[in-house]
Image (spheres, grey):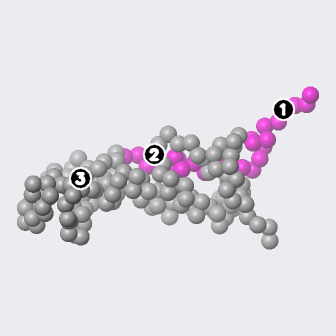
Amino acid sequence: MGEIVNRVAASKLVTFDLEEFYPEGQRVQLDVAQWLHEGVILIEKSFRESLQKHDWSPYEGNYVALYCSEEAILPAWAFSLVATHLQPFAAKIVVGTLEDLETAIYRDILANLDVASFTDLPVILKGCARKPVPQNAYLMAIEKLQPVAKSILFGEACSSVPLFKKKRS
């Protein structure tokens, strides 16, 4: 029997781990229903007054997902007005769920990421995450890597699923 060779370690395979880009900071949901009359009606004057009186400092550095827990009909500007108060404090603000928030965070990160170092290399998109990496982040990563990578696999080096292989010219 010959020497055992770790073919994974010897390969040019590089790992792209979305977890490495996960920014620290608390993720919070903020319900605008708390500022509605009886929880369902937006009265502009009292809505504005409530927002003015609210202490926004606890949101310092947080990532915030705005939503309304009630079946209220809100004017298009309602979330935007809340955002104007949050903006000096929050790291990121979106309307939607925490998953929408994570997707928006990754959209920003990946849009500004230089992937030149992955040019003509086989890339494995690491699939196991301990942090809440949204499914859309994997799609955005593929969109970013596919133009440059030689191939893209998903999973771990020992058990990966081929996703893409560049055609030879």
The quadrant of the image that shows the C terminus is bottom right
Q: Position of residue 155 (x, y in %)?
A: 63, 46
Mark 1 surroundings within 10 Å by alpha-carbon count, few (fewer than 14), some (14 through 19), many (20 or more): few
Residue corresponding to mark 3:
69
Magenta-span inclusion, residue 5? yes
Identify the image quadrant of residue 2: top right
The earlier-in-sequence mark between 1 and 3 is 1
Identified by mark 1, the residue type is: Ile
Residue stretch in magenta: 1-25
Residue corresponding to mark 1:
4
Determine the secondary structure under disc 2: loop
Q: Is residue 48 visible?
A: no
Determine the secondary structure under disc 3: loop
The quadrant of the image that shows the N terminus is top right
Q: Is residue 10 left or right of residue 146?
A: right
Q: Is residue 129 left or right of residue 81?
A: right
Identity of the residue drawn at 46% across and 61% down = 107
Identify the image quadrant of residue 42: bottom left
Identified by mark 2, the residue type is: Pro
Label placed on residue 132: 2
Identify the image quadrant of residue 72: bottom left
* Towards the viewer: 139 or 115: 139
The earlier-in-sequence mark between 2 and 1 is 1
The Cα atoms of the two marked residues, 2 and 1, are separated by 37 Å
Q: Is residue 14 left or right of residue 2?
A: left
Disc number lying in front (2 or 1): 2
Determine the secondary structure under disc 1: loop
Does 134 appear above or below 85? Answer: above
Mark 3 surroundings within 10 Å by alpha-carbon count, few (fewer than 14), some (14 through 19), many (20 or more): few
Identity of the residue drawn at 50% across and 64% down = 111
Q: Position of residue 152 (x, y in %)?
A: 67, 56
